[in-house]
Image (cartoon, coloured by chain):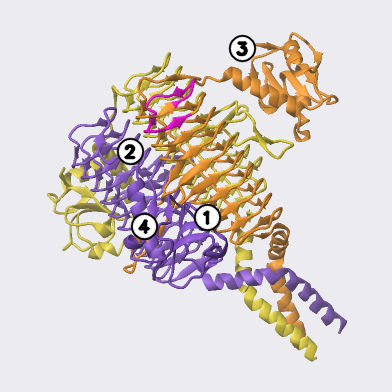
Chain colours: A yellow, B orange, C purple
Amino acid sequence: MEIKARDLAVVLNAKLEGNPEATVTKLAKIEEADEQSFCFLANPKYYHYAQTAKAGILLCDETLEYNTANIAAALRVKEPYQAFQKLMELYAAMNSSEKTSGIAKQSYIGQKSTYGENLYLGAFASIGDYVQIGKNVKIHANVSIGDHAVIGDNTTLYSQVSVYHHCKIGANCIIHSGSVIGSDGFGFAPQADGSYKKIPQTGNVEIGDNVEIGANTCIDRAVIGSTKIGNGVKLDNLIQVAHNVEIGDHSVIAAQAGISGSTKFGKYVLIGGQAGITGHLNIGDGVKIQAQAAVIRDVESGKGISGVPAIDAREHYRQLAAIKQLPDLIKKIKELEKKLEDQ
Amino acid sequence: MEIKARDLAVVLNAKLEGNPEATVTKLAKIEEADEQSFCFLANPKYYHYAQTAKAGILLCDETLEYNTANIAAALRVKEPYQAFQKLMELYAAMNSSEKTSGIAKQSYIGQKSTYGENLYLGAFASIGDYVQIGKNVKIHANVSIGDHAVIGDNTTLYSQVSVYHHCKIGANCIIHSGSVIGSDGFGFAPQADGSYKKIPQTGNVEIGDNVEIGANTCIDRAVIGSTKIGNGVKLDNLIQVAHNVEIGDHSVIAAQAGISGSTKFGKYVLIGGQAGITGHLNIGDGVKIQAQAAVIRDVESGKGISGVPAIDAREHYRQLAAIKQLPDLIKKIKELEKKLEDQ
Amino acid sequence: MEIKARDLAVVLNAKLEGNPEATVTKLAKIEEADEQSFCFLANPKYYHYAQTAKAGILLCDETLEYNTANIAAALRVKEPYQAFQKLMELYAAMNSSEKTSGIAKQSYIGQKSTYGENLYLGAFASIGDYVQIGKNVKIHANVSIGDHAVIGDNTTLYSQVSVYHHCKIGANCIIHSGSVIGSDGFGFAPQADGSYKKIPQTGNVEIGDNVEIGANTCIDRAVIGSTKIGNGVKLDNLIQVAHNVEIGDHSVIAAQAGISGSTKFGKYVLIGGQAGITGHLNIGDGVKIQAQAAVIRDVESGKGISGVPAIDAREHYRQLAAIKQLPDLIKKIKELEKKLEDQ
């Protein structure tokens, strides 16, 4: 598909410079662009490419200088990043090859399950009994949904997702391949002989609206009640959320983080990759937990923490700086000792 | 389903206080309970809820004081936690919507495979050739089992589990969704040109009886012989168990821990979340490895270790306490230096 | 299957000692061997077993002394490890029970998809539209492949693998169960009200030739362009590779490592288990990153780094050694202070 500079200028409400007939056929990063590419520059770190890169059309701010020998046309806007995002959405919508509706012949829907208009159900997707599915839901190939589960409107489950029985997923959610919603929490009672007895996990998982969950992430069902994921929460890949955890609205958790049982998070929490949070804690609103931190105590709202075990982030950086000096410090102390002896 | 206090009193062999006709319709945590809820209190940390929470029926010990205005009936027993567990098991059994038997029309069973009575085989489950399946086995939707695998009696595999060829799983096991049993170990021989050549992984995985494995956990097959998971072992979600690892009976491993190749664990080992253990180690019976520890040496039976690299846990705490003092220490040394110079 | 020492001596071009008619029926590690076992010894750490272990046939170097009372025959070669690998490949080829071709009746292939000769397609495998599959490809049960994906010759995808739309996998690759190729990158734009808006992930994943990917590993698609895995790269289980990451040829990454967005690696990089690498970094050729390290800065070619945050590995070991001395150091400083006061 070819797009002309003058057409994009209209779509983006941009000031056009250069050849209005310049055409592009693809979206590219400026460092990989060629004459057929549409590119954008919003980060000053990459501005130097404006002098060296070839591009069909460059989207940029109102003043950036670029090499007109290499770049056929420029589209100037006040906020190039926002204009670019608008364009990305258009592009994604146009290029999407995803099915939007239709129930594969080789799929399975159990008894008494219901679904709204426009369902897409891929090949070998399996829906249990008494499942409630909203409208415009997309369930890709090889997904498994247990009995009594509820899936809200406009939600997409990619291939290989497992939703266990009685779990509830809100509207406008996206869950990526291989994620598991509602597996049993890790609860075992130690017995007198050193073995362990399973504690039944009788609860479920409840996920709010506008949640996105990455690939191969696990959210365990509650021992009693619900493991709760708030509205607008974004979870990356390979995250562990244990039973009875509650994550407040609009919190964001990076890949491979792990949260132990019954810990409760406020809203707008940020958790870095590979961080670990022990069980039964209360973490306030807006807390920022750095990557690889080990959180073992409650954290007040608004705090930033890091380290193993996690402490106030500034104090942690002070400790790291001090550790750097430690080998020299040891020498210095030996010198001091010697001086004192020599006196 | 409604249950009356007087009926539960009989089931639990409990002393009944308050209204014997009080009814409950659900199980709830005391902090989320209402007049329809059955609750229990066994942890002194939560005793204060006995004064403020509403509940239909409260299970508690023989002396706890509670607010009779808010709680319609109490059931008193010597060991409320144990009584509660008994009740949970009953509840789980009654509320279970899981299929107990039946072979889905849209499932696949290969040649020469056998299975015992009461098999449940979900939609799109695929069983290879020469597979041996015991009695009362439940294999949920979209599970894949490779040729020559063996699955013991009363074992449950949840949806999306993969069992590779020739792997053996014992009796009374539970494996949660997305876990992979028997993928190739990570073995490559470096070549002269800097590339790597695959070392064939000719072994299998053998899992004992009464083992539970969480969601999206990986257990690699042995290069030769077997990767071995003992009886009664409990593995959480997203754990990595490399080729030729052996885990002793009744060991418990928390989420996201990782174990490198050929390391052997005794019985009753506890491993915290996100801990890493390098390869070719011997870890004794009853060893406790803290969360996020990095184990790089053999560990004697009974030891508790933590830190990166992991050392005796008490020594590690002593080091952590010392690091806290380090920034002040640096100041102090500067003062000492100055004093000495001033003399 | 029984094999005789004299036949193996020919296959391996080895010098035979002991009984040429000695037979073995299995491959075993020397510590688990019996009279029916074929074993090898190449690692001096295990040489002592040559005195105590029973074995049918032992493969070893030209000089190792062994107990002829327990070991019926020995095969001597210059390089026992390489001879053993040759044997393992033969063994794997003979014992492989894997299907080599055939399209299961209960599989699904969408419109306009093409495939080469010798395709194996397992039960309930789902192939989208416009997919291009090379020759000798093995796609196991319950695999899902999205529209417009490309799979190269001789590549194997084990059960439960998900390949998203438009992703490309090279020739001679192996991808283990549960791995996800091409899920959306984790990109969200913060909004004025504290919520997040999804940034469309318009790119794909491109995987080179001779790549092996472990179980439950995730590789996200690029926001624009491609997330790139070079030729000969080996990824272990449960690894996170974020959007727009590029991994150079013949790099090796151990289990549970995580790489944030847009970081670029040179060739021949080694990354230890559970290491974390932040986004937008440049890591040179041949860099060695230790297990559990946290890499937060660019790394020059050839460097070895470790620690949190990661620094030069030798400097890190120097710091670790210093920390060990810290509790004693604190005592010493108190003594110095006292001495000075006493003067």
Mark 4 residue element? helix
Of the residues tagged 3 and 2, which is closer to the observer? 2
Q: Could you confirm whether marks 4 and 3 are on the same chain? A: no
Identify residue type, mark 2.
His
Pointers 3 and 2 in contact (C-beta within 8 Å): no
Label drawn at residue C87 = 4
Of the residues tagged 1 and 2, which is closer to the observer? 1
Q: Position of residue A117 (x, y in %)?
A: 33, 19
Q: Chain of mark 4?
A: C
Q: Position of residue A69 (x, y in %)?
A: 16, 63
Label drawn at residue B148 = none
Q: Could you confirm whether marks 3 and 2 are on the same chain? A: no
Mark 1 residue element? loop
Q: Nearer the viewer, residue A272 or C188?
A: A272
Of the residues tagged 1 and 3, which is closer to the observer? 1
Calculate the distance from the C-alpha at mark 1 to the C-alpha at mark 4.
21 Å
Above or below, A161 against A296 in this view is above
* Residue holding disc 1: B262
Above or below, C311 against B258 in this view is below
Dominant SS type (magenta): loop
Q: Could you confirm whether marks 1 and 3 are on the same chain? A: yes
Mark 1: few/some/many CA within 10 Å (<14, 14-19, 20+) = many
* Residue holding disc 3: B1
Mark 2: few/some/many CA within 10 Å (<14, 14-19, 20+) = many
Q: Chain of mark 1?
A: B
Q: Could you confirm whether marks 4 and 2 are on the same chain? A: yes
Calculate the distance from the C-alpha at mark 1 to the C-alpha at mark 2.
28 Å
